[in-house]
Image (cartoon, grey):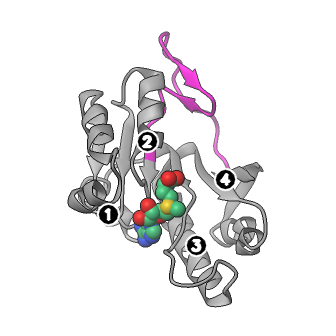
Amino acid sequence: MATRESIKEFPSAENGEKDEEDEKWIAHYSSNHQILLVGEGDFSFSLSLANAFASASNICATSLDSYDVLKRKYKNAASNLENLGKLRATLLYVVNVSTMKFHTELANRKFDRIIFNFPHAGFYGKEDNLDMIKMHKQLVQRFFWSAKRMLRVNGEIHVNHKTSYPYCLWNLEGLATASFLALIQR
Ligand SMILES: C[S@@+](CC[C@H](N)C(=O)[O-])C[C@H]1O[C@@H](n2cnc3c(N)ncnc32)[C@H](O)[C@@H]1O
């Protein structure tokens, strides 16, 4: 089972969004949102969102892996990236969530939604190993800390995460609270 945590900058400010006539909503996401995706794998989530909007001009999709590594790891990565490019997505590689706010392409940008689907620090041991859990928590903690500074007013951070044992031990809500973020939806 997976859950999507919607975590909001706290305290929230008044809604200053502009309504545009051709706004399109896909689940939690509007075509008027500036959306940042981090820690992408084969970029299939970014592409499905872009396809649903029929445009990716509001989407900045990033991965920790370089383009070459992605191509080697995931058979669909190259075609997904090509299609995202055609839909005018901004694509960035070797973006670390810990330092992303200093990335040259991101330093001056703010986002309405920042999404990290299934954060995971790597497979260096069993999933219930306490040292591994500590690594995963540190990753998410650093992500929250960076992402918080990259949110627009009323922005939200979304994390998809398994809720079963041992993933429940990550205590995402506690990590968010430590970054002065408030849980608004699970
Ligand atoms: C379980 S995979 C999930 C991939 C993708 N988000 C998805 O839902 O299919 C975990 C992802 O976290 C990324 N990751 C791990 N550490 C990271 C970091 N410090 N900065 C950015 N991404 C990171 C990995 O590169 C990997 O793509």
- At x 66%, y 58%, the residue is 161
Dominant secondary structure of the magenta stretch?
A: loop
Does residue 89 appear in this view? no
Gap between marks 3 and 2 measured at Cα: 25 Å
Classify mark 2: helix, strand or loop.
helix
User: Which one is nearer the viewer's eye here, 4 or 71?
Assistant: 71
Gap between marks 2 and 4 measured at Cα: 23 Å
The three-letter amino acid code for the residue at tag 3 is Gln
Q: Would you say the residues marked 1 and 4 are in contact, meaning their CB atoms lie under 8 Å apart? A: no
In this image, 11 relative to 147: left or right? right
- At x 74%, y 65%, the residue is 173
| Of callouts 4 and 3, the N-terminal one | 4
Q: Position of residue 136 (x, y in %)?
A: 58, 76
Where are the magenta residues, as a range?
A: 12-36
- At x 35%, y 64%, the residue is 64
**Residue at the far left in the pictured view:** 68
Residue that label 1 marks: 65
Mark 1 and ligand 1: say if the CB distance to the nearest ligand atom is below 8 Å: yes
Indicate yes or no whether the magenta region holds residue 136. Answer: no
In this image, 45 relative to 71: left or right? right
Does residue 5 appear in this view? yes
Residue that label 2 marks: 44
Residue that label 3 marks: 141
User: Which one is nearer the viewer's eye here, 143 or 62?
Assistant: 62
Q: Position of residue 75 (x, y in %)?
A: 33, 49
